[in-house]
Amino acid sequence: MNFVTFQHQKKETFGLLIDQDSILPLSHQAGLPGTLLELISQGPSALATASRLKSSPNVSTLSLKDVQLMAPIPRPPSMRDGYAFRQHVMTARRNRGLEMIPEFDQFPVFYFTNHQAVTGPGPVHVQELHLDKLDFELEVAIVIGKRGRNIKATEADEYIFGYTIMNDWSARTLQMEEMKLNLGPAKGKDFATSIGPFLATRESLLKAGALVPSPKGERLNASMKAYLNGHQYSEGNVNQMDWTFAQIIERASYGVDLFPGDVIGSGTVGTGCFLELNGSKITQNLWLKPGDKMKLEIDHLGVLENEIVLDRK
């Protein structure tokens, strides 16, 4: 099942994506709650109710063109982003004249980003300083499905509710200035993170054969691509993650609780940002500007489309 959150008649609601053209609204239907986050928190019984409604012959749907899609989880309880793709880390460091850092292989690292600055498909509003080397990052993200603490990697996949596309927008000049002080990223990242267009349940991906077991945890076999203004610049596969989401969950939950609706990103796939592409001379000082249209595409997870808009306030 593919869940969406959307605006319809000036109201925020959630539902199921039935096909490419229609949505089944679920808010407050058959005892279901008003938001997708609440549905995830209620657990398997609420998910089963949603599945029954999808199969009902008497349900009414909305046309996708009559709604505005939002992030599937517009206000997650927390948002972490990982650093799981060796190719990206190694290439980005090499381009700065640095050796590969050995700690990469010792534990999966992540940072917290602004869970109150989440956007879905559509415009991404930025300020003047963000446009100094404004970048995209092609990533996949998971949403936690149940509360847990000190979760072992061998059990961690059971804590995943679903998967979605993530674009970790990055103001590189702000980011690099801050990180000279050995803190951050902060203002270089906290202005926007886009996820969507829908949240595909782990159950549905298992049924599709897209999640492949491995000794380190499940791996999503899904092609990843990024396009700027219709031109493709990036390509990879989620299965290239050197650290699995199960391993990242084990690290993230050590000594702390994870909660339903928490979002955890993978980090950037190799070739998945202009910082890496420019440094490798694949592109030449290419950065995002107002009016640019960015499209991220991941098999089984759809297409996340955004446009850069400058706010002059």
Image: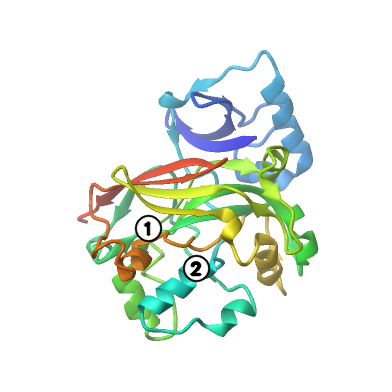
Amino acid under disc 2: Gln
The alpha-carbon separation of the residues under discs 2 and 1 comes to: 17 Å
Residue shown at 68% from the left, 14% from the top? 57
Residue at numbered disc 2: 87
**Residue 200, image x, y percentages:** 61, 41
Residue 105, quarter of the rendered image: bottom right
Q: Residue at x 46, y 84 (%)?
A: 99
Label disc, if present, on residue 136 of the rendered structure: 1
- Seen at 61% across and 53% down, the residue is 142
Q: Residues within 10 Å of mark 1 (few under 14, many from 20)?
A: many
On screen, 104 above or below 265?
below
Q: Position of residue 83 (x, y in %)?
A: 53, 69
Q: Nearer the viewer, residue 234 or 292?
A: 234
Q: Secondary structure at mark 2?
A: helix
Which is more toward the observer, 228 or 68? 228
Would you place residue 79 above or below residue 166 in this image? below
Whether residue 146 can be seen here: no
Point out the residue furthest to the top here: 58
Name the residue rendered at 34%, 62% in the picture: 274
Q: Position of residue 59 (x, y in %)?
A: 63, 17
Q: Using residue 160 as the reference point, say whether residue 280 is left or right of it.
A: left
Q: Position of residue 171 (x, y in %)?
A: 33, 66
Quadrant in the rendering for residue 251:
bottom right
Residue 48 visible (yes or no): yes
